[in-house]
Amino acid sequence: MYDWIVIDELTASPPQNWNRILLRWRILAPHICRNNLTRREVDRIAEAAQISRRQVYADLRKYRHYVSGDPVKGPMTGVHYHICQRQEQVIAEVIENMSGGAKLHEVIKEIGRICARRQVNIPSATAIGTRFGKVSAAVNLKGRLITRCDAVLDICGLPIESRDHDGNVRSLHLLTILDTLDGAVLNYRLSVGFPPPREVQNLIAAYAKESPSSIRLLLTKAFADSVEILSAGIPAGVVLDYSRNIRAGRAIKAALGSRLGRIKLRIDQKTWAHGSELPPVDFSMADAVIRRLSNPKTGLNSTNSISGPS
């Protein structure tokens, strides 16, 4: 019922904290709506979650604020670090609808106008600025990659492991199709291990289905061994262009940077096979975090599909 609460926490935390946060959530979640916990019950919860009794009370109070939609305050500074869902919705709408050249003060003014009309408390300039700052400038990949293609297919590794259908632990990979005009992610897929050709073909087909005309798609060096296979299984209207000079991950780094939220992207193909010191995570949890970290203008589009373990 309140899974979005723990997903919010996971997106704000590095992967090494995910399993600890998830363990704490699973233990505390059944008690969020209970106001009559005995001291003995609190002690049992604290022991199971491996936290102090004081932390149990603090976390339950925080989760209750999340559920009610009230702003949550930090215990030491009193600073708001969470705003209600209606405020989040207004901020997201304004940032998405205003032009890419909009200034922060223009965004703040528009948010204030909409909040007043909807009778929503106006969020602070700091809260708006933090979210507005996540929208990065458009990146012209045509010039950077020296290409005339409409889009580029690229892939990078993630420092996160999960289990495939056979129970094998493998690193996650982020497969993307980027617009070469502005660097926006047009479609993407998360996979356990390097995605097989059929999975890549499905992603290309899904992208082609949403495109009104023929597409010229550039493949990076990561797909050197599967160009012929991919060419044989793509829909009509898609033309593949392959370049050995564009290293895997180069387009992703140019468009998204070296991190997605608190997740460091493994751009260098040599690091993809490196294991993780962290225990494997549930694929659906990683799926949900990637979706929540997405940005509808310049980041990952949360409406696109993510594949399960393969």
Image (cartoon, rainbow, N blue to C red):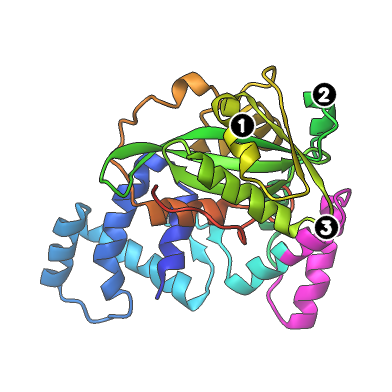
Residue 8 inside the magenta-drawn segment: no
Q: Nearer the viewer, residue 285 or 10?
A: 285
Q: Are marks 3 and 1 in contact (CB under 8 Å)?
A: no
Residue displayed at 38% across by 51% down: 283
Q: Tag on residue 228?
A: 1
**Residue 139, image x, y percentages:** 79, 36
- Which corner quadrant of the image does residue 7 belong to? bottom left
Residue at label 2?
146
Q: How many marks?
A: 3
Q: Amino acid at mark 1?
A: Glu
Query: Which of the two labelled residues, at mark 2 and mark 1, occupies the earlier sequence position?
Result: 2
Residue 181 visible in this rendered orientation of the protein: yes
Q: Amino acid at mark 2?
A: Ile
**Residue 265, image x, y percentages:** 53, 33
SS assignment at label 3? loop
Q: CA distance from mark 2 to mark 3?
A: 24 Å
Magenta highlight range = 93-122
Residue displayed at 83% across by 72% down: 113
